[in-house]
Structure formats: C-alpha cells, structure tokens
Amino acid sequence: MLLMDIDGHILAVSTERYEVLHERPLFAEQDPEVWWEKTCLAIRKVIEISGCSSDSIQGIGLTGQMHSLVVLDSDGKVIRPAILWSDQRTQPECDWMNEHIGSSHILRFTANPALPNFTATKLQWIRQHEPYHFKKIAKILLPKDYIRYCLTGEYASDVSDASGTLLFDVRNRHWSQEMCERLEIPMEWLPRVLESPELTGTVNPTAAAKTGLQIGTKVVAGAGDQASGAVGNGIVRSGVVSSTIGTSGVVFAFAKNIVQDEQGRLHSFCHAVPGAWHVMGVTQAAGGSLQWYAKQFAPLEQALAETLAEDVYNLLAKEAAQVAAGSEGLVYLPYLLGERTPHLDPYARAVFFGVTVRHKRAHFVRGIMEGVSFSLRDSLSLIEDLQLPIEEIRLSGGGAKSDLWCSIQTNIYGRSVHTVESDEGPAFGAAILAGVGTGCFVDVESACDLLIMRKHTYHPQLDEMNLYNRQYAVYKEIYELLKPLYRKFIS
C-alpha cells in the first residue's frame, strides 16, 4: 500500500502480511476477509504516516495477485477461502478441459493453455469436489476485485487481470462466451471488465468508516500485479522488457498487437495500457525459492536479522557474494511449485544438482539465485523467438534490491540490465493508473515518461557470461533427463 503525489514522490508505504494455508499437498488458500481487514489497516496507516488529509486523495488504483479465485454468494458473502494462483491441485481439471474442449480451442478462445494456475480450473475443481459450495455461487472475483467490491460495492475487473482467468477473450478484450458455454459458467457470475485506468466506482460509506477514506473517492479498474508492475517500471513501449523477481518470477514484454506462443509457454494477456497487449513467462518459485530456503535452513540468519533489524535476505546475499560465480558446479532447478515457463509441468520438482562436500550454505543461496535467473533466461529466449524486440531489460521486485542478484542476472542474460528509482513496482503502477483515471496525467505512457527514471545499470562480464552459458546448457539438460521421473514420483 502506498500514497503517491502527482510528482511521483512516495509519501507513505505500509505493508501487512497474511498467511497462506497449505492444508493438503498442492493446496494454497487465503481468507479474502483477512485481505480486506489488512487493507483497511494499511490504508489508515499510509494516511497517518503521510500526514495528508484523506480529502486530498484524488483516486485509488488497485492491484493484486492474479488468477486466485474468490467466490461469493447472492448476499456478497465469501463462500470459501480463495484458491490461490500457486495452488497446484487442478491438473485433472486441466486434463478434462483439454479433452472435452480441446487444447487448440482453448488457445483460440483465450490465447492461453489450460494450466492449474488459471482461475477457470479452480472453479471446475469446486464444481467437482465441493458441489455444496458451487451451488451457492453468485459471483466470482479476483483478489483485487474483491477489495474493490468491499470499497465500492461494485463488481468489476480490468482486462489485464481478466486475461489470466481462462474465461477471457484476450484478442477482443471481453469475456469469452465460448469458454463460458463449454464450462457451463453463467455469464452473470462475471464482473464487468474495463480498461485499467477507467473509473469503476467510488468509496461507499461503510468502507469510508473502516479505512478513513472520504466517501466518494474515485476507484479505477487497476491491473493484475504483473501488468501494474510493468506500468510501475515503464514497460509501456516496444523494446522495453522487465525481469521481476518476487515470490514468482516474471519476464514481461510489451506488444502493440496480440502475439501468441503456439505452445502456450508464454502467457498472452491484455496490458494495463489501453489497447495494448503483453506476453510474459513465469517462474513459479523465484523469490519463493529463497523464502523457502530461509524458512527451512537459515534459523541463525533469521535470528540475526531480527536482532540487527535487517532483512534476512540481505544477510543471505552477503554470504552468497563470497562464493564464486557458478557456485562450484552446484545447479538449482527452481521447481518447488511445478513450473510454468517453459515446461508447463505441474509435476516438475526442485533439484539441487552437483552437490559435493565442498558446498556450504552460501553455495546453496547463490545456487538458488543462479537457478532462478536461468529459469528467467528461458522466458527471454522464448520472447526473442516471437520476434519481439529486447532493447532494454529493467529489473524489479525484491531481486532488484540485491546487487548480487542483479549482477547474476546481467551475466546469465548476457545483456546490460537496469533498475529504476521506484522499487514499489505494482503499487506504484496502480497509483499511476489512478492518476490517469482521475485526470492527473494524460495517459499511461506520458505518465511513465514523467515519473520513472533509471537508477543503476549492470553490465555483463565476459568470463562469467561464458561460465554461465556452459552451466545453462547443463541446467536445461537436467530437466529433460528428470522429466520422465517426475510424474512417476508424484503418482
């Protein structure tokens, strides 16, 4: 949550955490009502921290995790916990959709393949496994759109977020009647869809009382976290590409016209820039791999970080920086949650390959950073295969705050990379969209030109590039050799 002025200065930031529930293997859920409670708290905090009067706030932009499914009953009440983007339970539903609808038809209708991450597969799971919940459904929403409903009482979404549902005609920027008919999903369950800077409603009295916002404050459509983050990094013209390392990792490229990978390895979505599209490759567990490692294997660093009031990931990166490039032959495949790009394989699993007695914890940390970067290189290669220009790569997310991870990326990509002044990507992008929607800026592109500046540039070193090129070939071969074993292991 952030508050930004018209010059792009961030006046206040507030972060609230909430738990992911893993009640069974492959499951990942959260309580949408907790999202709303935390949102109210964060809004009050940024108003207090900034010292601004709430009546000076011109508009609100929304962003949030994509794909996750919120189901509401006829009274607007949450029926069950949200099934998250990272949940991997729905491969059988994907298989059913491919068999009964046809994978080629799904690609034609939605521009994307059936993957466990996408919203429609989660809805099918509820139909099959929780019919008592399914029969109560009156509306389905995405995470940020549930917050919008709480703020305004309006059921609405935007084209970028809707693109990740597998229910949306990405080419024509509206819900796909063909997909809804084949899945027997009533169109009235779906929110209206707008372009990202468009107004969707205003803050209602109930929300104003809970948040401290003024009644009538304008709320724009906003965007899914990746499209909003792209706006926050200035990925609004051809040739500028972002590599984002958050919990997941995303390589994001602007496209003037819709572009599709015929195998569906890259997602083709509507952009938050009206009338534009983007393609993106996704690494399921990017920063999530480092989070997992820190939680399971770094209790000393966790305790020290608390004592020093420092980020535990900074401490881990300092240790990893003492290890030479290549981690002495240790190679990590970051498939803790299966993998999207380029494998579309929910059964893939993470691997440390080449472990010897010489390897210490710092090697594993650096190995994770390198393995995640190899995975993102896969996406860059596919974007090049689509003939989309890559003239500049901008780094963002938590990975962009680490000099080491930035250096690793420039050497693995074999290209210069840049960071930008604002490191609040998606939230900053949502604020820009709010500014455009309320008339503070003419359009998204000119707002980005005005507000977004480069911060640091990293250049590749030839010796490390060559080493990583050799290691990348091994990285790719490991997956191909293990692929037949993954499904056997899961079954």
Image (cartoon, rainbow, N blue to C red):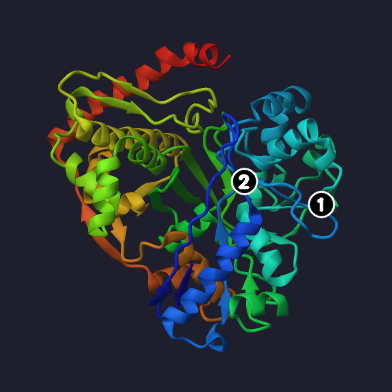
* Residue tagged 1: 189
User: So how many labels did they put on this image?
Assistant: 2
Q: Amino acid at mark 2?
A: His
Disc on the earlier residue, 2 or 1: 2
Image quadrant for the C terminus?
Answer: top right
- In the displayed structure, 433 sits above or below 7; it is above
- The three-letter code of the residue at mark 1 reads Trp
Residue under label 2, please give it: 67
Gap between marks 2 and 1, in whole Å? Answer: 16 Å
In the image, 488 versus 283, the foreground residue is 488
Q: As drawn, is 225 to the left or to the right of 91?
A: left
Residue 144: image location, x then y, percent: 61, 59
Q: Secondary structure at mark 1?
A: helix
The residue depicted at 44 percent of the width and 86 percent of the height is: 51
Image coordinates of residue 320 in percent, x first then y, are 20, 39
Q: Dot 2, crowdedness within 10 Å: few (<14), some or many (≥20)?
A: many
Q: Quadrant of residue 205?
A: bottom right
Side (left or right) of 22 relative to 407: right
Give left or right: position of 360 versus 205: left
Picture coordinates of residue 403 (x, y %)?
A: 22, 51
